[in-house]
Image (cartoon, helix red, strand yellow):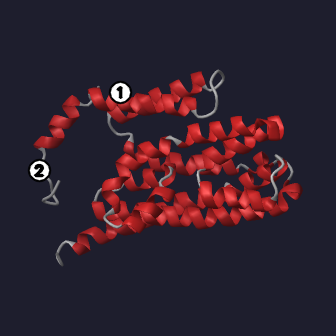
Amino acid sequence: MTGAQPQSSPEVAAAIRSSFAVGLAVAAYGISFGALSVAAGLDVWQTCVLSLLMFSGGSQFALVGVIATGGAAAGGAAIASAVLLGTRNSLYALRVAPMIGPGRLKRLLAGHWTIDESTAVATAQPTLESQRAGFWWTGLVIYVGWNLTTLIGALIGDQLGDVSRYGLDAAAAAAFLGLLWPRLKQLQPITVAVGAAVVAAVLMPVLPAGVPVLAAALVAVVVGLTNLFGTRESDLAEAEPDPMGER
């Protein structure tokens, strides 16, 4: 056990660095949400409660986006859009559950912090220890940062004007792309990325918020179940010796 710890330390440190890089970029985007939420008609407290309890950026933006266009009368449609978009997190839970470890309170908190970024950082790591570090640190950094910047955005929203001009949405997307890019070394993940992007882009103009994301996720499901473009790669991986002495 003592001999294995030094080998895992650099990997854990790398996971924590990724957590802060992605987490800070995403948290900055909370300013945009806070400002847009107040502009849509919610007050500061309602906006902050959304970030504290919902804590799913895509669902939160979907909710305030529908309210902004339809007012209070569109509340039902806004909730439906947010719920639909948030169902993707239940799929993430299947992937990150083995990384969390036992304990009801730990799993309850993990369920709240299972979002795009915590899942992406965790699954990008090579060992179980670094996966856990990536998940928890990313969740912590984003949760604290997102709620702080939501409050800031809600308080100074009127002074910000058009929040899209600051490029906060681009910063979050760039951080996510930076995390994804090193994984696009083989044909199968490239196929999933391109296929999902095409499906989402085609369906976004014609389907409600959330549906294109779920449809794009089906690309990964189909490719994964059928192992398209991955048979040869899997065979080669099984034939290679594991330098860590474990699977």
**In the picture shown, does residue 78 fall above or below 200?**
below
What residue is at 66 percent from the left and 23 percent from the top?
205
In the figure, residue 229 lies in which quadrant?
A: top left
Position of 206 compared to 132: left or right? right
- On the image, the x and y values in percent for residue 150 come to 71, 60
Crowd rating for badge 2 (residues with CA inside 10 Å; few <14, some 14–19, many 20+): few
- On the image, the x and y values in percent for residue 166 come to 76, 51
**In the picture shown, does residue 108 fall above or below 115?**
below
Tell me which amino acid carries mark 1: Val
**In the picture shown, does residue 132 fall above or below 186?**
below
* Residue denoted by label 2: 241
> Which quarter of the rendering shows the N terminus?
bottom left
What residue is at 27 percent from the left and 26 percent from the top?
226
What residue is at 79 percent from the left and 54 percent from the top?
35
Q: Are marks 2 and 1 in contact (CB under 8 Å)?
A: no
Q: Is residue 145 visible?
A: yes
* Residue denoted by label 1: 222
> Which one is in front, 178 or 137?
137
Position of 48 compared to 91: left or right? right
- On the image, the x and y values in percent for residue 239 come to 11, 42
Q: In terms of secondary structure, where does tag 2 sit?
A: loop
Q: Is residue 229 visible?
A: no
Tell me which amino acid carries mark 2: Pro
What residue is at 36 percent from the left and 47 percent from the top?
94
> Which one is in front, 90 or 115?
90
